[in-house]
């Protein structure tokens, strides 16, 4: 296997390499996992979008606690230190979190959402109303990303822009 797909021993697989090693921007990615509280804050060069099923997330953003509600696409500028401090279950099953990592440069190039960009880069958190983005749509974005088909990944990014424009 090539190093770009598998990495070095102990490194995450290619679909987990969202954070650039030598640049502040990073790359587009979507992952689904069971969320856990973090030991310490971290930051990276993305607009991060979270969509949680079966729970609520509590983040610390520079000393302020923010609740990310269930089944709501919530976005923030991940270049500011952030930390999941608590995950509360709302169902019998384990919570399932979808993280969408949008590189800052790609986000800033999205049309007709400049007001949102200003709000996020100023430390705001934006929750898209559930009527504009549901679990099925988020799951489709994950499938498109995992397909390793560039065009499908680009379509998902375009759909994210459309959801944000509609919500604004």
Image (cartoon, grey):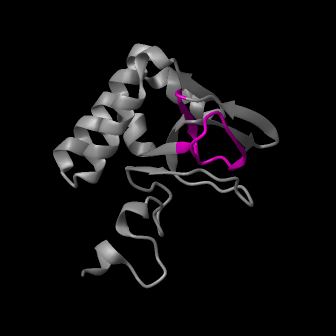
Q: Where is residue 29 in the image (x, y as percent from the top left)?
A: 38, 51
- Which residue: 34% across, 44% down? 142
- Decide if residue 96 is on the left or right side of residue 38: left
Examine the structure image and report whether residue 7 is included in the region drawn in magenta.
no
Q: Where is 125 relative to 102, above or below? A: above
- Which residue: 38% across, 34% down? 138
- Which residue: 77% across, 43% down? 62
Q: Which residue lies furthest to the front in this view?
A: 92
Residue 58 seen in the current view = yes
Which residues fall within the magenta stretch? Answer: 71-96
- Decide if residue 60 is on the left or right side of residue 166: right
Within the image, what quadrant is residue 163 found in? top left
Q: Position of residue 70 (x, y in %)?
A: 58, 29
Q: Position of residue 31 (x, y in %)?
A: 43, 51
Q: Where is 129 relative to 47, above or below? A: above
Residue 47 seen in the current view = no
User: How many marks overall?
Assistant: 0
Q: Residue furthest right?
A: 63
Examine the structure image and report whether residue 91 is included in the region drawn in magenta.
yes
Q: Where is 115 relative to 99, above or below? A: above
Is 15 in front, or is 52?
52
Q: Where is 107 relative to 82, above or below? A: above
Q: Position of residue 72 (x, y in %)?
A: 53, 27
Is 29 in front, or is 130?
130
- Which residue: 18% across, 51% down? 149
Which quarter of the image is occupied by the N terminus?
Answer: bottom left
Within the image, what quadrant is residue 39 found in? bottom right
């Amino acid at each position: 296997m090539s190093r770009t797909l598998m990495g070095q021993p102990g490194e995450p697989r290619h679909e987990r390499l969202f954070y650039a090693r030598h640049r502040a921007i990073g790359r587009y990615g979507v992952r689904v996992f069971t969320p856990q509280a973090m030991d310490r804050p971290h930051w990276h060069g993305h607009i991060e979008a979270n969509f949680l099923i079966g729970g609520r997330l509590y983040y610390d953003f520079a000393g302020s606690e923010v609740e990310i509600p269930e089944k709501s696409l919530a976005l923030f500028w991940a270049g500011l230190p952030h930390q999941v401090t608590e995950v509360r279950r709302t169902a019998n099953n384990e919570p399932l979190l979808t993280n969408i990592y949008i590189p800052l440069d790609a986000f800033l190039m999205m049309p007709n959402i400049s007001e949102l960009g200003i709000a996020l880069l100023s430390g705001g958190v934006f929750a898209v109303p559930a009527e504009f983005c549901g679990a099925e749509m988020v799951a489709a974005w994950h499938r498109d990303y995992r397909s390793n088909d560039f065009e499908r990944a680009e379509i998902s990014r375009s759909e994210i822009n459309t959801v944000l424009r509609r919500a604004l």
